[in-house]
Image (cartoon, grey):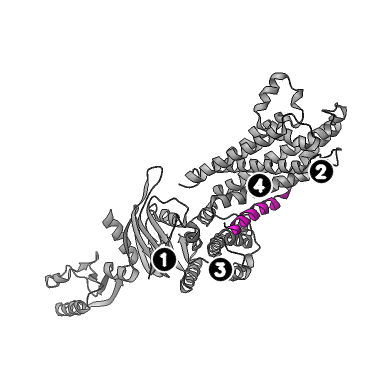
């Protein structure tokens, strides 16, 4: 199936001389949740802004549903909704007026029934006649989402959707994003909360200093780059690791009470069995054991470190 | 053509007028009424008629122009500057709209408001002075062309302005003096000969003269020249706006 967004060799240098993007090559699949990860200033917002038409592209081509974003900007942009990072919304307007404005701006005739349902889904219906200045930050964020969805786009960009949003609201928002995905909307979100990407995304792209350094399915990314650790709580402290266990490259905790075995998440469990058997022969007893998996955050940090 | 977008922008801008009704409509009407009371009735009653027109009636077209020029400029400039300032311009830039539609929305709304104000002041003037309109259709033509031209001019100011101060400075420091010196309150034939020449460099002279001709059939300069000057000014503003959108100057990087 054709990718819904195709970014080919996109580069962007700002008039100041700052090169924000270098030869970005990226396909977004129809109907997925794609998370764009990267530190501040990596180029996430620039990439989104170019696709949405806010920033002029430099070199390269961007196609949205097969439509060139420059030559066929009208059709391309009608397919896109954007929730910006900043809470930029005209505060003197009412919620209802502002969503009607957005729908009209994107060339759609009025549809009060759809907008009513949209506001209900976002728990904004009882605030429809309130001026936006009277709303809380979380509500303003939802108003921005409602504005972005007012023209029923196929693609939704969320630039840092949960920045400054409390935990409960963040969960609500994630649920809402999943519902949207289930209804067929393709979602691209940028975030620097890695847990967000880990929780939500189907695929992940990592951008650093204007370069896309990695794009992969989340699960395979976690498998490929993820590490697992087995932690054994010893009944008696061990002065040093016995030579017979050197093959396992164990680590001993600082207080000598814990043995740590790091293994590849993809490997068979056989090594663990043999390790435990060895410990038994050596007479090393343990009171507790558990395993932990490296999070996307660990992977991300190691990626950033590698690239540096 | 994205007509829904033009309508959305236009209605958004008019809604802003409704929200600020006192500031938008009541205050220009009040200040113009004061002019009529002071210059028209009080002082005017002691002044000789100009070109056979009583002084109170003579200043009616100039006072309308004064409001139309300042209001269309400041409204259009504020209308496009606000989204830039608050960041909401992202939505306009990401929408499937062309420069023409954006301009029709913003400039159309600013011009509509200025025309409406002009007509309200015209209506108000009836309560203070006696006057008649000799060429109503030409009067409307001048009013509409002036409102559109100066709304375009205001749009340019709004796009180029970097601060609220810069936004205010042109209406305050340029438009108002030019209007006062452009014959709102006097006929330029009353000036010393040298100043009669200098004043011809003031574009507002042509607007007021043409507008006054549509009321009383008398003009300081040829009415055809007045019309040509308005169209020239409008064309210049359109050219500048085309250049702004073509290059993305101050709008898009």
Q: Residues within 10 Å of mark 4 (few under 14, many from 20)?
A: many
User: Disc 2 versus disc 3: distance between alpha carbons?
Assistant: 48 Å
Question: Residue at position x 12%, y 73% from top?
Answer: A244
- Please tell me in which quadrant of the rendered image residue A45 appears: bottom left
Question: Mark 1–mark 3 contact, CB under 8 Å?
Answer: no
Q: Toward the viewer: A59 or A226? A: A59
Q: Which residue is located at x 67 percent, y 46 percent?
A: B111
Q: For marks 1 and 3, give the CA distance.
A: 26 Å
Badge 3, how many Cα within 10 Å: few under 14, some, many 20+? some
Are the numbered discs 2 and 3 placed on the same chain, yes or no? no
Q: Nearer the viewer, mark 1 or mark 3?
A: 1
Mark 2–mark 4 distance (CA, rounded to whole Å)? 21 Å
> Which label sits in the foreground, 2 or 3?
2
Q: Quadrant of residue B170?
A: top right
Image height of A284 relative to A83, above or below: below
Residue on which disc 1 sits:
A4
Crowding at label 2, few (<14), some or many (≥20) Cα neighbours within 10 Å? some
Question: Does B91 appear in magenta?
Answer: no
Taking the image as shown, residue B187 lies to the left or right of residue A294, namely right
The residue under label 2 is B124
The spot of residue B183 in percent (x, y) is: 73, 30
Residue on which disc 4 sits? B110
Start-end of magenta stretch: B1-21
Q: Residues within 10 Å of mark 1 (few under 14, many from 20)?
A: some
The residue under label 3 is A122
Q: Main secondary structure of the magenta part?
A: helix
């Amino acid at each position: 199936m054709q990718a819904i967004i195709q970014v080919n060799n996109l580069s962007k240098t700002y008039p100041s001389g700052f090169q924000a993007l270098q030869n970005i090559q990226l396909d977004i699949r129809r109907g997925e949740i794609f998370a764009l990860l990267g530190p501040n200033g990596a180029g996430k917002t620039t990439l989104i802004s170019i696709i949405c038409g806010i920033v002029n592209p430099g070199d390269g081509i961007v196609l949205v549903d097969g439509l060139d974003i420059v030559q066929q900007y009208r059709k391309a942009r009608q397919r896109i909704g954007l929730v910006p990072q900043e809470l930029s919304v005209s505060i003197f307007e009412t919620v209802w007026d502002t969503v009607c404005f957005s729908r009209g701006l994107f060339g759609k005739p009025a549809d009060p029934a759809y907008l009513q349902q949209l506001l209900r889904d976002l728990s904004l219906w009882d605030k429809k006649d309130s001026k936006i200045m009277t709303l809380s930050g979380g509500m303003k964020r939802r108003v921005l989402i409602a504005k972005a969805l007012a023209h029923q786009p196929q693609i939704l960009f969320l630039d840092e959707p949960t920045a400054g949003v409390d935990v409960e609201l963040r969960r609500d928002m994630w649920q809402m994003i999943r519902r949207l995905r289930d209804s067929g909307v393709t979602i691209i979100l940028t975030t620097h909360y890695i847990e967000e990407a880990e929780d939500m995304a189907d695929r992940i792209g990592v951008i650093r200093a204007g370069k896309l350094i990695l794009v992969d399915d989340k699960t395979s990314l976690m498998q490929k780059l993820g590490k697992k650790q087995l932690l054994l709580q010893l009944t008696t402290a061990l002065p040093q690791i016995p030579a017979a266990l050197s093959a396992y490259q164990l680590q001993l905790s600082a207080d000598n009470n814990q043995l740590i075995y790091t293994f590849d998440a993809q490997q068979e469990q056989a090594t663990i069995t043999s390790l435990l058997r060895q410990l038994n022969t050596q007479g090393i007893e343990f009171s507790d054991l558990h395993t932990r998996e490296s999070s996307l955050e660990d992977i991300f940090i190691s990626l950033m470190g590698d690239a540096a | 053509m994205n007509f829904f977008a033009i309508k959305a922008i236009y209605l958004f801008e008019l809604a802003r007028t409704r929200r600020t009704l006192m500031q938008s409509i009541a205050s220009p009407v009040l200040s113009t009424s004061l002019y009529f009371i002071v210059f028209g009735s009080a002082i005017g009653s002691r002044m000789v008629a100009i070109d056979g027109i009583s002084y109170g009636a003579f200043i009616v077209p100039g006072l309308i122009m004064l409001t139309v020029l300042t209001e269309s400029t400041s409204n259009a400039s504020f209308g496009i500057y606000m989204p830039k300032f608050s960041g909401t311009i992202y939505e306009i830039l990401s929408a499937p709209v062309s420069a023409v539609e954006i301009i029709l929305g913003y400039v159309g709304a600013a011009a509509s408001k200025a025309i409406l104000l002009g007509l309200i002041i015209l209506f108000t003037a009836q309560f203070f002075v006696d006057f008649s309109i000799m060429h109503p259709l030409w009067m409307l033509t001048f009013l509409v062309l002036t409102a559109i031209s100066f709304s375009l001019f205001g749009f340019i100011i709004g796009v180029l302005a970097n601060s609220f101060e810069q936004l205010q400075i042109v209406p305050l420091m340029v438009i108002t003096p030019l209007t006062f010196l452009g014959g709102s309150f006097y006929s330029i034939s009353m000036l010393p000969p040298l100043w009669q020449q200098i004043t011809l460099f003031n574009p507002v002279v042509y607007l007021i003269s043409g507008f006054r001709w549509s009321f009383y059939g008398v003009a300081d300069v040829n009415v055809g020249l007045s019309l040509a000057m308005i169209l020239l000014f409008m064309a210049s503003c359109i050219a500048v706006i085309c250049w702004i959108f073509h290059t993305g100057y101050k709008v898009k990087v």
